[in-house]
Amino acid sequence: MVSSLRLPALTSLFSPSFTRRSTVSLRRRLHLRPPLAAGFSAQSAASSPTETEDRVDSKKSGRVQDRGSTDRVITPRSQDFNAWYLDVIANAELADYGPVRGTMVIRPYGYAMWEAIQDYLNVKFKETGHSNMYFPQFIPYSFIEKEASHVEGFSPELALVTIGGGKELEEKLVVRPTSETIVNHMFTQWIHSYRDLPLMINQWANVTRWEMRTKPFVRTLEFLWQEGHTAHATLEEAEKEALQMIDVYTKFAYEQAAIPVIAGRKSKVETFAGADKTYTIEAMMGDRKALQAGTSHNLGQNFSRAFGTQFTDENGLRQHVWQTSWAISTRFVGGIIMTHGDDAGLMLPPRIAPVQVVIVPIWKKVDEKTGVLDAASSVAETLKNAGLKVKLDDTDQRTPGWKFNFWEMKGVPLRIEIGPRDVSSGSVVISRRDIPGKQGKVFGISMEPSILEAYVKDRLDEIQSSLLQRAISFRDSNIVDVSSYEELKEAISLGKWARGPWSASDADELRIKEETGATIRCFPFEQPQGTKTCLMTGKHADEVAIFAKSY
Amino acid sequence: MVSSLRLPALTSLFSPSFTRRSTVSLRRRLHLRPPLAAGFSAQSAASSPTETEDRVDSKKSGRVQDRGSTDRVITPRSQDFNAWYLDVIANAELADYGPVRGTMVIRPYGYAMWEAIQDYLNVKFKETGHSNMYFPQFIPYSFIEKEASHVEGFSPELALVTIGGGKELEEKLVVRPTSETIVNHMFTQWIHSYRDLPLMINQWANVTRWEMRTKPFVRTLEFLWQEGHTAHATLEEAEKEALQMIDVYTKFAYEQAAIPVIAGRKSKVETFAGADKTYTIEAMMGDRKALQAGTSHNLGQNFSRAFGTQFTDENGLRQHVWQTSWAISTRFVGGIIMTHGDDAGLMLPPRIAPVQVVIVPIWKKVDEKTGVLDAASSVAETLKNAGLKVKLDDTDQRTPGWKFNFWEMKGVPLRIEIGPRDVSSGSVVISRRDIPGKQGKVFGISMEPSILEAYVKDRLDEIQSSLLQRAISFRDSNIVDVSSYEELKEAISLGKWARGPWSASDADELRIKEETGATIRCFPFEQPQGTKTCLMTGKHADEVAIFAKSY
């Protein structure tokens, strides 16, 4: 049960590519920062020969003294999705590797994406009646043991503090992998009467899981998340809450991250131990693997019975509370990268982008410089005052062409170019990140503040919905309706998602996993009309399920 | 040097009162939630007979099934400041004890105070050019050892992870007590040229220090903080930054927390190892002890030399960077409690208060209820729309009198009462938390939204500055100007702060500490005019220093 909030599924079939890229097609040359120092994990106590890790493929040919002296390329997405992902993270400076194997330093540009996620969700959590608080990260080992019978294979993932203040501890402390146990320990002290319910809290915190196969953002030894925990007087209330929160996540994914997740219920096999029901949002990445991007659990009375969390109801009777928990983590940042990026690098939905508009001033002659920079500053000011996130790239260390490539690679939705002729005509040139080349470029947009502001905001809205539409098309063209196991196998072998009626056994479900590598991602909430016949057994089925390989 | 951000000074003279309160004068009776379950630390592996802890003085006489059946009292502040502090934390539900000795659960009301601190500082940090990011909390033990020679007595405070993923680790991992070592490890990889400088980052994080004597908020085994880390090309820039950040903290303390801190420089003895200079803000608590409430360090090149953090300057020469670090922690919440509280409980400055206005509807007859509740809701809506934090306490489980006491105890700055007569006259009664009884109560304030909003906002502003003025008066009447060691000793023995010219030796400073329990809190930035004679040696002194006992 302690693993009930596990975003990275224990059963994950993700198999990282260990092949170091030796030759790459140089689609474009970018003069970027020096390669990240790789291979530090060898120095770490934590590494062992059996442990593997996706690492940024850094050239080790000597430390470079200055940015700009290195040629860095981004592996084309179509050529090697994993290498592309790691190249983007390194070049866009989203994250770096920490000194301890499997840990990640989240750099400002990547952290700003996480802040955009936090800003939106934090408001929604409060609107839906939840309060933030903070629980200690050290949990007595005995708490975890209480739950051990419910958690197959979880203890191998714990980090344990055994020495504190120079002394061996009498009882080992677990570094929080999730907080159900300590939450219930405290809830038991705080909840007495039905008047104390519902108790609805959330915490933003770091959690630690000793993962063997790590990948930046997607699966790291330590990650950041929010974990909601609620206690209710009735099953119905808990169920309503679990559904409400998966709905909050779904809206966030669609409206902010432009990721058309499929929300649904996990199969019994995939429901986390400790939960009566697990709801999930499943996102299709650019390589068509599924990413479990958020989960919400109806925990029933499983934890309240284990921890004796009871209340006196209106009739004076003692009852166990009904609970939920739900979480989204920094994994979601990985989901945004892998949903929208292209060969040129990141492509960020405007509502998540740390920089929504980059302004590149262009001049050749010295006497042009002041006029161009003044106009650029004034445009930047206009847009900042309109509440937009604006970056004016006025360095003279780089050419405009270099800057275009750089900010494209960083995924900035809109670019504004201002040259001497634009200054004369009082207009600017605006390019969209999501429409490459001339097609995405519009000349002669007036610098007049109200016109410019309206134009930019409209384009950002367009890009936001265009990214979502594109992702929906991609998703829908890669989901195949299947009515037999043969069809399912074919769809999976083509890298697609298979959707088909399902009422077969858990054993059949596990067989599919073994034979195809695909798992049931969910029974989607949105179900087709009509009678259904189980793809495996030919018997009646109530629902269709979606099968896919996943991260 | 890893201890350079230590807010709780290693040299702290704080000596908690271990005496359990046996008799208390019942100044007031509050029907509050049941007592916090105490004594759990006995179950924890971490506890040992030599370890002590200030604990909420809970009556253990049986678990109570329902709130309201318990009489809880707050020990008068004048009688036992420490017991008062713990009572307030328990009754106002600011925090509770975690299952592991010395850890703290920050409950929603206490966490909301921390969020108010975060909201303000986070904006200021960004305005001053800093970006948020996140470093892993696990640091290889070898990193800390690098710095060990600089850090007397630090390793006894480390929590060490020795088992990960079921295996004994080759190298122990330190659970972050502060991040200078890992920050410099990464900075060394990221900084190459002067164009990479200044590098200015901040992180909001949890940190762990194995403290033996803990006290909620003031000193806990795990606490929350922000830690800023910057790297610069010159000493002058680093010095400017360190001063800028102590200034940000000072403004925050005055303008938001209404705490008239004294900002200044630490003496050489009190400067943290690893820092060239330490700046501090020192706050006077209600018991007149000093609380070091925030620090900013000019680290010089100490860490950059230890970690080889170098850049190529404009002339092509390799140079070590100049650095700063600065931090404020959840300790500040303790400072707010201990600055403004009184015998009735918390008293919160409006800009920090989780609830700024509480509305208490009053009715006796059933036919009055609807009218009163409608008016109360409408007033609540008006004030919420005006951006205020409003709580409508419309439960019929409690009497108005109980609610008055309860919300006073919770420190809410303004209370609005609405009864049937108020509904008839279209007006409300407003009471100030900071002016007890009838004096603070005004009748007949119009419910008309624009009038009410303006009135409430004005009162909140008044309360904000009144709390600050009161704290300034208290502070100033408890600082004694001294010109000899005898005068200093007398002032300290009276529990006051002593301010006097100082140019004596480190040995003299340590002697004062041994003989009086007081330390130099700082050489204040604001210095009196005129020539000065050292209180100890009679020789010329450039500056006055402030001496006090401290937490």
Image (cartoon, coloured by chain):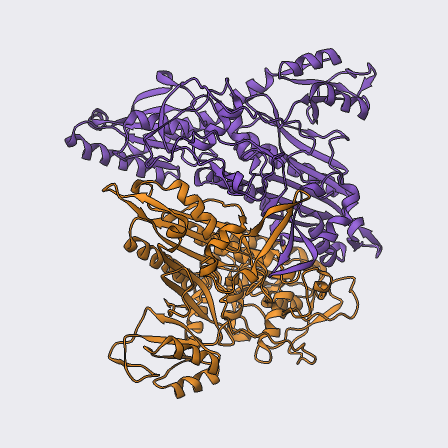
Chain colours: A purple, B orange
In depth, the one of A286 and A427 nearer the eye is A286
* Quarter of the image that includes the C terminus of chain A: top right
Quadrant of the image occupied by residue A223: top right
B401 versus A168 height, above or below: below
Asked if residue B536 lies left or right of residue A228, the reply is left
In depth, the one of B167 and B21 nearer the eye is B167
Residue drawn at the location 37% of the way across and 47% of the way down:
B309
A106 versus B488 height, above or below: above
Report x, y in % for residue B411. 56, 66
B164 versus B7 height, above or below: above
In depth, the one of B158 and A337 nearer the eye is B158
In depth, the one of B260 and B148 nearer the eye is B148
Report x, y in % for residue A478. 60, 16
Asked if residue A11 lies left or right of residue A310, the reply is left
- In the rendered image, is residue B99 in sight? no
* Quarter of the image that includes the N terminus of chain A: top right
Asked if residue A242 lies left or right of residue A459, the reply is right
The single residue placed furthest to the left in the displayed view is A367
